Amino acid sequence: MPGTSPHTGSTGGPSSVRVDSWAWAVRLFKTRSAASDACKAGHLKVNGDRAKPAQPVKVGDEVRAFVGDTERIYIARRLITKRVSAAMAADCFEDRTPPSPPRTETPAAVLRERGAGRPTKRERRLLEQLRGR
């Protein structure tokens, strides 16, 4: 096509961007330095391999991010380097994260009166039975 360089896609954007920049731009992390630190710690993977901050991401690549205690799986749909609104950022990736398992109901905390002392053996067994242990 006339007027397009080999480094740009059909939309006129870059053919690849840094993984830390893309993760920050699509709001996976609050700051770019946090995205870079996540790469260095091994919390970002591109196509199954640990990603260094400068590793390129291309359209169609799978990006796995360990955020908190959960693993999130994204497919890059559009490449951006500048941070945009959450609505626009949602168009840049496809979320393939499996749904989390339903939460099991935990019993309410058992409260004892202050100053009641240690529970007796019988009371302790009842408390453990209520907690499901």
Image (spheres, rainbow, N blue to C red):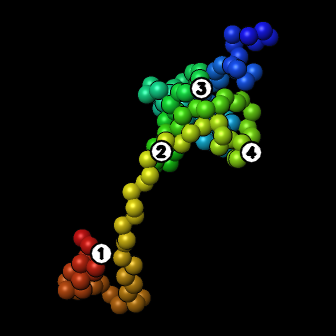
Q: Which mark is residue 97?
A: 2
Using the numbered discs, state the Cα–Cα distance from disc 1 to disc 3 in whole angstroms: 48 Å
Using the numbered discs, state the Cα–Cα distance from disc 3 to disc 4 in whole angstroms: 20 Å
Q: Residue 59 carries which label?
A: 3
Residue under the image location 26 percent in, 73 percent down: 132
Residue under the image location 60 percent in, 37 percent down: 93
Q: Position of residue 34 (x, y in %)?
A: 62, 38
Q: What element carries label 3?
A: loop
Q: What element carries label 2?
A: loop
Q: Along the horizontal axis of the image, is 41 left or right of 81?
A: left
Q: Position of residue 100 (x, y in %)?
A: 43, 54
Q: Residue 85 carries which label?
A: 4
Q: Position of residue 9 (x, y in %)?
A: 68, 19
Closer to us: 31 or 62 = 62
Closer to us: 81 or 50 = 81
Label 2, residues with CA under 10 Å away: few <14, some 14-19, many ≥20: few
Label 3, residues with CA under 10 Å away: few <14, some 14-19, many ≥20: some
Residue under the image location 66 percent in, 40 percent down: 91
Amino acid at circle 2: Thr
Q: Please say if the residues under marks 1 and 2 sit with CB atoms less than 8 Å apart.
A: no
Q: Mark 1 points at which residue?
A: 131
